[in-house]
Image (spheres, helix red, strand yellow):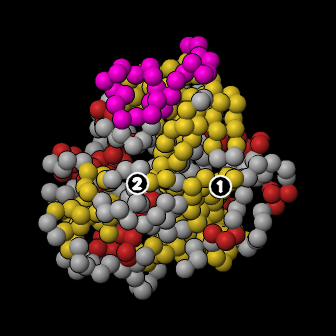
Amino acid sequence: MGFIKTLGAASALISLVFAVPVELEKRGAAFRLDQTVQKPFILSGPSAMAKTYAKYNKAIPAVIAAAAANNDGTVTADPEEYDAEYLCPVTVGSTTLNLDFDTGSSDLWVFSTELPTSEQSGHTLYNPSSGKLDSGETWSISYGDGSSASGNVYIDKVVVGGTTVTSQAVEAAETVSAEFESDAASDGLLGLAFDSINTASPNQVATFFENAIPTLAAPLFTANLKKGEPGNYNFGYIDSSEYTGSITYTPVNTANGFWEFTGSGYAVGSGRFVSSSIDGIADTGTTLLYLPAAAVTAYYSKVSGATNSASQGGYIFPCSATLPSITLGIGSYRAVVPGTYINYAPATGSQCFGGIQSNTGIGFSIYGDIFLKSQFVVFNGASTPELGFAAKPT
């Protein structure tokens, strides 16, 4: 898709310090939702990259496709390696499911009893008998790696934390591809991007967040993802204990349906800051951090033994390497991602796969979980949407 109009001077960044946002003066709900650890494994580096290209319907580069095909798709993770392993409990109808919260998509789709028995194994299933069929509505997702899912749309009650949406569109799967079926820990996905990229047809449907906004104390949610342990989402309020200093806000361009913003540059370790306009999206549903090739090359030039591996489809380095931090600019704010966060997973032998990879072929940068877990992030869905970033307490 065509991507991202450059934000001009009118989109200047604003930095604010506050204990309680103004919006909290309104009456409404506010709640915290903790993530739960479910999966004993994480995607291998090449498979994680292939999944990202597929998610955004971009052609998977041959070298990445080949590398993913030569991996079994997973690597065993130690118990403390939870960074890609947690889901959130959501009650859909009368059943509690474990769903991925994804700010890079806008469908609430779930495994259901309408699936063939052969595609149900290992999953908790939504029973549409608790809802009402939205007659004539269907949904379908398909990605460049061949994964797909489709089905009917029902109207049912959905409860997330302390908030209930009584008439939420729930996309019940009638068929899922083997790629989705094999991820037994996840029972579906709760999209938190904007309604314009919802796949229901002939009429798009609103996300849970959009429907919940009138009941929330403030039209926002925050992501407090963590390294090595489950994090949490807060809806309707900003918990001042979860960040330090000020929150820097940047405008969001919703034209493409994403939480899209413009970064201001990067620095590697203690090196100088390179000013550069970086068009990107904040995506909790993407594991890695995808940046312009120049930034990625600059980063790995400071990592001893790092190579852009054809067999792995991305940058790898000795697992024993000491990794520098990377600093990403958001206006005048400097978001620091510690080097320890950038060692994503074992690759091959004594080599590890980098958590930073090039956005070549995607068309925009993706600030995925490698970045997001280093920051406290506010997703403000007010009439003029914005993203807020702040450092976390040490």
- Is residue 152 on the magenta stretch? no
- Amino acid at the residue labelled 1: Arg
Residue occupying the point 52% across, 48% down:
88
Q: Earlier in the sequence, mark 2 or mark 1?
A: 1
The answer to whether marks 2 and 1 mark residues whose Cβ atoms lie closer than 8 Å is no
Whole-percent x and y of residue 168?
Answer: 64, 30
Query: Helix, strand or loop at disc 2?
Result: loop
Residue 222 occupies quadrant? bottom right
Residue 32 - label:
1
In this view of the protein, can residue 198 be seen by the observer? no
Q: Is residue 360 above or below residue 256?
A: below
Q: Residues within 10 Å of mark 2 (few under 14, many from 20)?
A: many
Quadrant including the C terminus: bottom right
Q: Residues within 10 Å of mark 1 (few under 14, many from 20)?
A: some
In this view of the protein, can residue 304 be seen by the observer? yes
- Is residue 135 on the magenta stretch? yes
Whole-percent x and y of residue 34?
Answer: 57, 55
- Amino acid at the residue labelled 2: Glu
Residue 174 occupies quadrant? top left
Q: Which residue carries the number 2 mark?
A: 85
Q: Which residues are magenta?
A: 110-136
Residue occupying the point 69% across, 35% down:
165
Query: Helix, strand or loop at disc 1?
Result: strand
252 or 101, which is in the foreground?
Answer: 101
**Relative to 75, is 162 on the left or the right?**
right
Residue occupying the point 48% across, 45% down:
100
Residue occupying the point 51% across, 28% down:
126
Whole-percent x and y of residue 268?
Answer: 39, 79
How many labels sit on residues? 2
Whole-percent x and y of residue 5?
Answer: 54, 51
Q: Is residue 123 above or below residue 174?
A: below
**Relative to 183, is 192 on the left or the right?**
right
